Image: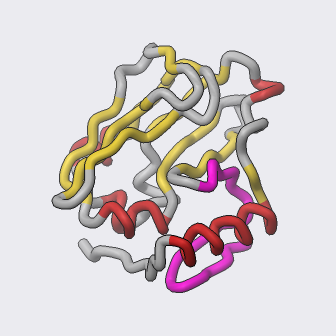
Protein backbone atom coordinates (compact mmCIF):
# COMPACT_ATOMS: atom_id res chain seq x y z
CA UNK A 1 0.00 0.00 0.00
CA UNK A 2 1.46 3.33 -1.08
CA UNK A 3 0.93 6.11 1.44
CA UNK A 4 1.38 9.75 0.54
CA UNK A 5 2.05 12.19 3.35
CA UNK A 6 1.25 15.89 3.28
CA UNK A 7 1.56 18.33 6.18
CA UNK A 8 1.82 15.35 8.53
CA UNK A 9 -1.36 13.76 7.14
CA UNK A 10 -1.25 10.17 5.93
CA UNK A 11 -3.18 9.65 2.68
CA UNK A 12 -3.21 5.98 1.61
CA UNK A 13 -3.51 5.83 -2.17
CA UNK A 14 -5.35 2.48 -2.27
CA UNK A 15 -8.43 3.74 -0.41
CA UNK A 16 -11.48 5.50 -1.86
CA UNK A 17 -12.46 8.90 -0.43
CA UNK A 18 -15.47 11.19 -0.32
CA UNK A 19 -12.91 14.05 -0.20
CA UNK A 20 -14.48 15.42 2.96
CA UNK A 21 -14.50 13.04 5.93
CA UNK A 22 -14.37 9.37 5.05
CA UNK A 23 -12.31 6.63 3.49
CA UNK A 24 -13.69 3.39 2.06
CA UNK A 25 -11.81 0.10 1.63
CA UNK A 26 -13.37 -2.54 -0.64
CA UNK A 27 -13.10 -5.99 0.98
CA UNK A 28 -12.66 -9.25 -0.97
CA UNK A 29 -16.15 -10.44 0.04
CA UNK A 30 -17.95 -7.51 -1.63
CA UNK A 31 -18.34 -5.56 1.60
CA UNK A 32 -16.85 -2.11 2.29
CA UNK A 33 -14.97 -1.02 5.44
CA UNK A 34 -15.42 2.68 6.29
CA UNK A 35 -13.58 5.09 8.58
CA UNK A 36 -12.56 8.73 8.80
CA UNK A 37 -9.43 10.24 7.29
CA UNK A 38 -6.35 11.47 9.11
CA UNK A 39 -7.11 15.14 8.23
CA UNK A 40 -10.69 14.68 9.51
CA UNK A 41 -9.63 13.21 12.87
CA UNK A 42 -7.16 16.09 13.27
CA UNK A 43 -9.83 18.72 12.55
CA UNK A 44 -12.24 17.05 15.00
CA UNK A 45 -9.76 16.99 17.88
CA UNK A 46 -9.54 14.24 20.50
CA UNK A 47 -12.56 11.97 19.98
CA UNK A 48 -14.39 11.38 23.26
CA UNK A 49 -17.52 9.53 22.11
CA UNK A 50 -18.47 7.35 19.15
CA UNK A 51 -21.93 6.05 18.37
CA UNK A 52 -22.59 3.71 15.46
CA UNK A 53 -25.96 2.61 14.06
CA UNK A 54 -26.96 -0.99 14.81
CA UNK A 55 -26.00 -3.94 12.62
CA UNK A 56 -28.83 -4.51 10.15
CA UNK A 57 -29.62 -0.80 9.81
CA UNK A 58 -30.13 0.38 6.22
CA UNK A 59 -28.69 3.82 5.43
CA UNK A 60 -29.17 5.90 2.32
CA UNK A 61 -26.32 7.82 0.65
CA UNK A 62 -25.16 10.76 2.81
CA UNK A 63 -27.25 9.69 5.85
CA UNK A 64 -25.17 9.18 9.02
CA UNK A 65 -23.72 5.72 9.72
CA UNK A 66 -22.10 6.92 12.92
CA UNK A 67 -21.48 10.07 14.93
CA UNK A 68 -18.33 11.28 16.63
CA UNK A 69 -17.89 13.84 19.40
CA UNK A 70 -14.82 15.65 20.62
CA UNK A 71 -14.45 18.59 22.97
CA UNK A 72 -14.83 20.98 20.02
CA UNK A 73 -16.86 19.11 17.41
CA UNK A 74 -19.77 16.72 16.97
CA UNK A 75 -20.90 15.37 13.65
CA UNK A 76 -22.27 12.54 11.60
CA UNK A 77 -20.24 10.24 9.39
CA UNK A 78 -22.12 9.97 6.08
CA UNK A 79 -22.83 6.78 4.17
CA UNK A 80 -20.88 6.81 0.88
CA UNK A 81 -23.65 4.78 -0.81
CA UNK A 82 -26.98 3.09 0.02
CA UNK A 83 -26.40 -0.05 2.06
CA UNK A 84 -26.82 -2.10 5.23
CA UNK A 85 -24.45 -2.06 8.20
CA UNK A 86 -23.16 -5.61 8.69
CA UNK A 87 -20.49 -4.96 11.33
CA UNK A 88 -19.53 -2.21 13.78
CA UNK A 89 -16.14 -1.75 15.39
CA UNK A 90 -16.69 -2.50 19.08
CA UNK A 91 -13.08 -1.53 19.82
CA UNK A 92 -13.80 2.09 18.75
CA UNK A 93 -17.04 2.16 20.75
CA UNK A 94 -15.02 1.12 23.83
CA UNK A 95 -12.02 3.40 23.06
CA UNK A 96 -13.11 6.41 20.95
CA UNK A 97 -9.59 7.92 21.06
CA UNK A 98 -8.42 5.12 18.71
CA UNK A 99 -9.83 7.29 15.90
CA UNK A 100 -7.07 9.80 16.67
CA UNK A 101 -4.38 7.14 16.95
CA UNK A 102 -5.03 4.73 14.06
CA UNK A 103 -7.67 6.17 11.70
CA UNK A 104 -6.86 3.78 8.81
CA UNK A 105 -6.31 0.56 10.74
CA UNK A 106 -7.72 -0.25 14.20
CA UNK A 107 -10.23 2.64 14.15
CA UNK A 108 -12.42 1.73 11.18
CA UNK A 109 -16.06 2.41 12.08
CA UNK A 110 -18.38 0.13 10.09
CA UNK A 111 -18.58 -2.52 7.41
CA UNK A 112 -21.41 -1.99 4.92
CA UNK A 113 -23.02 -4.20 2.24
CA UNK A 114 -23.99 -1.92 -0.67
CA UNK A 115 -27.45 -2.16 -2.22
CA UNK A 116 -25.87 -1.86 -5.67
CA UNK A 117 -22.24 -3.10 -5.67
CA UNK A 118 -21.72 -1.86 -9.24
CA UNK A 119 -22.41 1.72 -8.17
CA UNK A 120 -20.98 1.71 -4.61
CA UNK A 121 -17.85 3.72 -5.49
CA UNK A 122 -19.38 6.14 -8.01
CA UNK A 123 -19.28 9.16 -5.65
CA UNK A 124 -15.74 8.41 -4.42
CA UNK A 125 -12.22 9.10 -5.67
CA UNK A 126 -9.03 7.01 -5.34
CA UNK A 127 -5.34 7.05 -6.23
CA UNK A 128 -3.36 10.15 -7.18
CA UNK A 129 -6.56 12.10 -8.00
CA UNK A 130 -7.79 11.58 -4.45
CA UNK A 131 -4.41 12.50 -2.94
CA UNK A 132 -4.24 15.77 -4.92
CA UNK A 133 -7.80 16.72 -3.95
CA UNK A 134 -7.19 15.82 -0.30
CA UNK A 135 -4.06 18.02 -0.32
CA UNK A 136 -6.23 20.90 -1.56
CA UNK A 137 -8.70 20.19 1.30
CA UNK A 138 -5.81 20.21 3.80
CA UNK A 139 -4.60 23.56 2.43
CA UNK A 140 -8.11 25.07 2.39
CA UNK A 141 -8.62 24.24 6.09
CA UNK A 142 -4.95 24.84 6.99
CA UNK A 143 -4.61 21.41 8.62
CA UNK A 144 -1.38 20.09 10.11
CA UNK A 145 -2.07 16.48 11.05
CA UNK A 146 -1.01 15.03 14.34
CA UNK A 147 -1.84 11.83 16.13
CA UNK A 148 -2.83 11.60 19.74
CA UNK A 149 -0.86 8.96 21.59
CA UNK A 150 -2.18 6.13 23.75
- Where is residue 15 shown, x and y percent of the image? 68, 55
Describe residue 52's horizontal placement relative to residue 49 as left or right. Answer: right
Please name the residue shown 65% across and 47% down the image.
Answer: 25
**Magenta stretch, residue numbers:** 1-19
Please name the residue shown 19% across and 54% down the image.
Answer: 48
Describe residue 47's horizontal placement relative to residue 71 as left or right. Answer: right
Residue 131 part of the magenta segment: no
Q: Quadrant of residue 5?
A: bottom right
Relative vertical location of residue 19 with respect to residue 53 in this rendering, above or below: below
Say which of 30 and 5 sits in front. 5
Please name the residue shown 79% across and 27% down the image.
Answer: 119
- Where is residue 51 shown, x and y percent of the image? 28, 36
Residue 10 part of the magenta segment: yes
Relative vertical location of residue 107 with respect to residue 83 in this rendering, above or below: below
- Where is residue 150 shown, x and y percent of the image? 24, 72
Residue projecting furthest to the front: 140
Describe residue 33's horizontal placement relative to residue 74 as left or right. Answer: right
Please name the residue shown 44% across and 82% down the image.
Answer: 144
Amino acid sequence: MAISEYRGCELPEDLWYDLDYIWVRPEPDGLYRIGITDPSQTMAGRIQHVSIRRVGTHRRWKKPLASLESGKWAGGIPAPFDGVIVERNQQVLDRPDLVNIAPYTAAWLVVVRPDDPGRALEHLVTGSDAVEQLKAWIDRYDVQCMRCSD
